[in-house]
Image: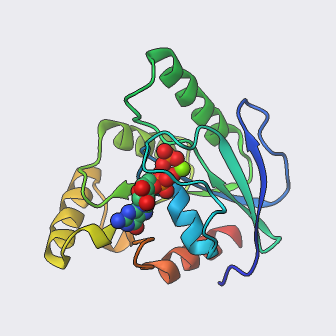
Amino acid sequence: MQIRQAEFVKSVADNNFLESDMSEVAFVGRSNVGKSSLINFITNRHKLAKTSSTPGKTKLINYFLINKSFLLVDLPGYGYAEVSKKQKTNWADFLENYLRTSKNLKCVYLLLDIRRTPTTQDEQMLQFLYFNRIPCKVVVTKIDTLSRSQVNNQLIIICNKLGINKEDLIVTSSQDKKGLDALLNSIEHYVSN
Ligand code: GTP
Ligand code: MG
């Protein structure tokens, strides 16, 4: 698949999720893991999704229409330390409501930074997706930040921690434009099924 066309549709701050008949795929993960950057990379648009070096940039659910045929959803990052407990609970509820109620959600891509061991929240997210029978794929981001051997070591750590196989990971770098085909092929598979 190639992304020929991408446009911002809407941002949602409450539980008024977009209602549509179109298939949806969503990117989820810790704040600052590179979700918005990955959306810009795969759509080949620099500023479609807002990115920031300050964690917690995406506080809304942002919907993008791709090739006029399916929706790509940028979810707010979790694990951002600088917010109150109440805000964290609100965000978790918001995320969970979206994940639980989006009927056309075909796959959730859980993003993990290659430099970090998956956190409890990453594991909980994966468990939540398994429990709710939402198909999911793990995407590793920012592989440009480590050497090849360090990348391989980290991939082993990530797989062991999450109990998944290396072949199931999608390995990417938005900066060095790596992993595009693997990610787009996967998205194509899910949105067309
Ligand atoms: P929130 O919206 O806060 O949840 O963050 P996010 O997951 O959308 O992350 P975002 O795409 O805004 O990127 C966070 C930071 O990581 C920015 O400074 C990006 O430039 C940087 N970044 C993203 N992808 C890559 C990558 O592939 N390589 C490197 N080296 N940096 C990256
Ligand atoms: Mg973001």
**What residue is rendered at 42% in x and 50% in y?**
53
Residue 10 lies left or right of residue 92; in this view the side is right
Whether residue 55 is situated above or below residue 109 in the rendered picture:
above
Q: Quadrant of the N terminus?
A: bottom right
Residue 185 location in percent, x, y?
A: 56, 79
Is residue 41 at all visible to an observer of this figure? Answer: yes
Residue 112 location in percent, x, y?
A: 37, 55
Given residues 109 and 31, the one toward you in this image is: 31
**What residue is rendered at 28% in x and 55% in y?**
163
Whether residue 44 is situated above or below residue 117 in the rendered picture:
below
Number of numbered callouts drawn? 0
Residue 29 lies left or right of residue 65; in this view the side is left
State how the image is colored.
rainbow
The image quarter containing residue 50 is bottom right
Given residues 97 and 112, the one toward you in this image is: 112
**What residue is rendered at 62% in x and 31% in y?**
94
Residue 48 lies left or right of residue 34; in this view the side is right
The image quarter containing residue 46 is bottom right
Q: Quadrant of the C terminus?
A: bottom right
